[in-house]
Amino acid sequence: MYKYFLRLLASVLLLLGFSMSANAEFKVGFVYVGPTGDHGWTYQHDEGRKAVEAAGIKTTYVESVPEGADAERVIRQLAQSGHDLIFTTSFGYMDPTNKVAKDFPNVKFEHATGYKREHSNVSTYSARFYEGRTLLGHMAGKMTKTNVIGYIASFPIPEVIRGINAMTLAAQKVNPNIKTKIVWVFTWYDPGKESEAAQALIDQGADIIMQHTDSTAPVQVAEKAGVWSFGQASDMQRFAPKSILTSIIDDWAPYYVERSIAARDGTWKQQNTWHGLKEGMVAMAPYNSAMGSGLVKEVEKLQKDLASGKAHSFTGPIYDQKGNLLVAEGKVADDGMLAGMSVYVKGVEGDIPK
Amino acid sequence: MIKIERRDETSNLIYFLTPVLAIFLTLVTGAIIFYLLGFKPLEALKFFFITPISDLYGLSELLVKATPLCLIAIGLSFCFKSNNWNIGAEGQLTFGGIVGGGVALLFYNHEGFYVLPLIILAGAIGGMVFAMIPAILKIYFNTNEILVSLMLVYVSKLLLDYLVVGPWSNPEGFNFPETRQFNDSARLPVLFEGLRIHAGIFIALVSVFLAWIVLFKTYLGFQIKVSGLSLKTAKYAGFKGKTMILLVFMVSGACAGLAGVGEITGPIGQLHRMISPEYGFTAIIVAFLGRLNPIGIVFASLIVALTYLGAETAQIFLQVPKYTGQVFQGMILFFLLASDFLLFFRIKFLGFKKYEY
């Protein structure tokens, strides 16, 4: 009986071994932090994956992978099961990605929003979302009547601070009286907390609601309260058709297709990508005609200028809250300064949580 | 008319076989669900339950995943056996992780054999103290321990959020919500090069052994069992009820705290907001599936751990939705409770005769 069992076990293992190694087709794997139906961050990454699939490359994904001890196993399993390129799409996968990359030198890894590239087969990529924030700031400055802009922020990391600053600078340019009020919710996705934050900001006089979180709750609260809002990550227009002026869209599709083809054809190289409006990684949803055709034209022109490099989100003079000069007149902030941004510019209310 | 009657006696053998039956029914129902979703049922089950553990790495991952579940469930069995409903193991785990992680950060850059034992001890004490809150409130104010222990989960999670975002965040980490990576002296050693299985498994095994001795070989174990069967009997027998409530909560909290500290010094290596994918809640299923018996819990933790791994593998190979893992966990518990019902009660079909009272 025991021997029979051993033989059975051996044959099962052998069979599995064959079925796994026989598969030499080029495959791309994706690791998501949320469910594909979150209508925000993960949803957009999955749209990118579908574009890769449409380009004739086989893809696989694993959704809702917690950023704790489980991430490493999932990434390793993808590498082990014959995936040649693996996109890990959340900051918390940074260390596990690098750890697995060390053991699989022939597999390519792409980590979103991180800063560690410890091995030559790890690239990082992110988008210049702040360029979109500049456009939002321009619209917010023009549309506000109360001169209070409400901002729902997730974590005080440079990416979020950059967005707040870019928006505030652009709004000040068209309306020197505006104030940016911020509520920190310390989550990327929590519809309950986000809607409470939106309501709190509206109660404090904000007539524009902006979010650096991923759920559709804030725009829905704004719609009900009759104030303006902006969508995040994907086009959230259908969740608040009257209130939304536009959405910043994360469009990962061109990048994912390009990198997948490069990996397949053997031209993939390690790089640190930071793409914006120019490359299309940041895109804008259709502008709401309620803001008037004049303003729409202004914003469209600004969008073109930001894309062509004629305009920059951080053009001097820029001062911090205490009045210290950050960027001199006629200069623009360099990428190093943007990447480590950790102070508010003048006009933002409150302190960065420490 | 249907009448439900309590059975006079139930077979001990069947009592321990019903979990096996529940698993079997789960597999059959799972196959049907896979079929309805458009997958080949046998192939899907293979990817779910066999592929994940078909190599050494997979087996090691199974043990990595089962270790915290087993530890917490062992602790919970003390509470549940004595009719104390500690639902807040997740909070005790988190608080243990916070205290243990705090010590690890305090000894940042200290090399020394004493660092790791200190961290582990701190984690156990942290979980224990946190579990004493619902126990003391129950003893002196007659509060409901289910509510108190559950609400404290959110307290500890928010405290962890605050610490990793603010005072304990990595100074070189660009304000990302995580602490520094702990030193090697603060990490549980890995047992085999290339695998993640770590020394935490010994903590779990020792707990299983100690739990078995306490529950089956000591007077205290007898008291716990009697209180679970009948509180009144326990009172007549003169058992000190209050001390026992405190004690079972302390054991349960210490185990959860150990699980938390095992995660952060084991596979994770730092504190951040996601130190546990709700192990504290899943361990409740494990405890009941294992019949609140230490040996049963070992097997139950392996099976439930496998549902996690299986969900990932099935999604990788077949793109089965990830949440089937939770469906399987739910089904196992459902079938277990259903067979328990039939085990302890009998359903009599009385036909449509006039019912006599």
Image (cartoon, coloured by chain):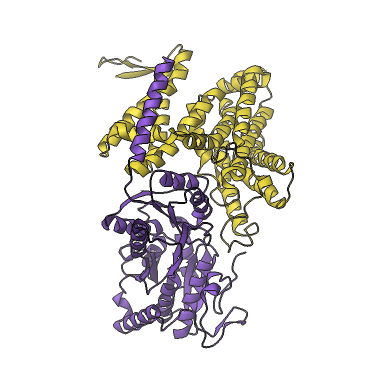
* Residue at x 31%, y 81% (from the top left corner): A292
* Residue at x 26%, y 14% (from the top left corner): B353
* Residue at x 59%, y 21% (from the top left corner): B225
Q: Position of residue A145 (x, y in %)?
A: 43, 80
* Residue at x 34%, y 63% (from the top left corner): A258
Q: Which chain is painted in purple?
A: A
Residue that sits furthest to the front in the current view: A266
Examine the rendering and report whether any part of residue A148 can be seen: yes
Residue that sits furthest to the bottom in the current view: A330
Q: Which chain is painted in yellow?
A: B
Is B42 or B195 nearer to us in this picture? B195
Q: Position of residue A199 (x, y in %)?
A: 46, 64
With A260 as the anchor, is A183 left or right in this view? right
Examine the rendered structure and indicate whether residue B186 appears above or below residue B167.
Answer: above
Q: Position of residue B12 (x, y in %)?
A: 48, 14
Q: Quadrant of residue B244?
A: top right
Q: Quadrant of residue A48?
A: bottom left
Examine the rendered structure and indicate whether residue B211 appears above or below residue B120.
Answer: above
Is A223 or A315 nearer to us in this picture? A315
Q: Quadrant of the N terminus of chain B?
A: top left
Q: Position of residue A322 (x, y in %)?
A: 63, 79
Examine the rendering and report whether any part of residue B338 can be seen: no
Examine the rendered structure and indicate whether residue A182 appears above or below residue B303.
Answer: below
User: In this figure, what is the number of numbered marks?
Assistant: 0
Examine the rendered structure and indicate whether residue B134 appears above or below residue A141.
Answer: above
Q: Quadrant of the C terminus of chain B?
A: top left
Is B313 or B135 nearer to us in this picture? B313
